[in-house]
Amino acid sequence: MAELNIKTVGGNGSFADVIAAAPPEIQCLAHSARALLADVMPGITEVPWARQKIAGYGVGPKKMSQHFCYIAPFKKHLNLGFMYGAHLPDPRNLLEGQGADLRHVKIRSAVDLERPALRDLIDNASRYLPKLK
């Protein structure tokens, strides 16, 4: 696997620790989602929280003020979550959730990660950090 342009800081473990309990196919999706994030935003900061089974991504280590998305593995899918997803344009209705800010996209196959609309969501989310404005 090629080296990704990701800065890993803080947290409590590694990305491998975050996805370790997930089935192999979900681990593969998690690696692909991580590569997509690094492709959309080279130099992205990653904070893996192994105990919580989640990895956050953004411009720095602070979860709600510097992160714009996260990866969370489950048994049958992967959540690619967006900290301010409720505020993002989503013309293809990919986002799920009901919270004031948080939304997520369920990733069930590699095809899901290839959707241009998902790349657009990631790109828009990477620019939407209201607490930095």
Image (cartoon, helix red, strand yellow):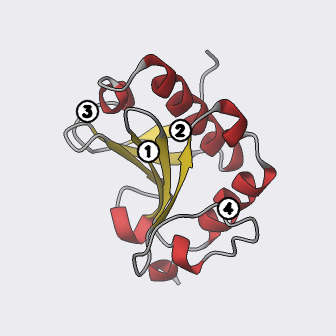
Q: CA distance from mark 3 to mark 4?
A: 27 Å
Q: Quadrant of residue 117?
A: bottom right
First in residue order: circle 4 vs circle 2 = 2
Q: Quadrant of residue 17?
A: top left
Q: Is residue 105 left or right of residue 110?
A: left
Q: Is residue 112 above or below residue 80?
A: above
Q: Is residue 58 above or below residue 33?
A: below
- Residue picked out by circle 4: 121
Q: Quadrant of residue 99?
A: bottom left
Q: CA distance from mark 4 to mark 2?
A: 19 Å
Badge 2, how many Cα within 10 Å: few under 14, some, many 20+?
some
Q: Measuring from the top left, give residue 81's x and y in whole percent.
A: 48, 56
First in residue order: circle 3 vs circle 4 = 3
- Residue picked out by circle 1: 46
Q: CA distance from mark 3 to mark 2?
A: 15 Å
Residue lying at 36% horizontally and 29% vertically, measured from the top left: 19
Discs 4/2, front: 4
Discs 3/4, front: 4
- Asked whether 113 or 34 is in front, the reply is 113
- Residue picked out by circle 2: 6
Q: Measuring from the top left, give residue 41's x and y in whole percent.
A: 65, 50
How many marks are shown on the rendered structure? Answer: 4
Badge 1, how many Cα within 10 Å: few under 14, some, many 20+?
many
- Asked whether 107 or 128 is in front, the reply is 107
Q: Is residue 114 left or right of residue 18?
A: right
Tag 1 and tag 2, C-beta contact below 8 Å = yes
Tag 3 and tag 1, C-beta contact below 8 Å = no
First in residue order: circle 3 vs circle 2 = 2
Disc number placed over residue 13 in the picture, else none: 3
Q: CA distance from mark 1 to mark 2?
A: 7 Å
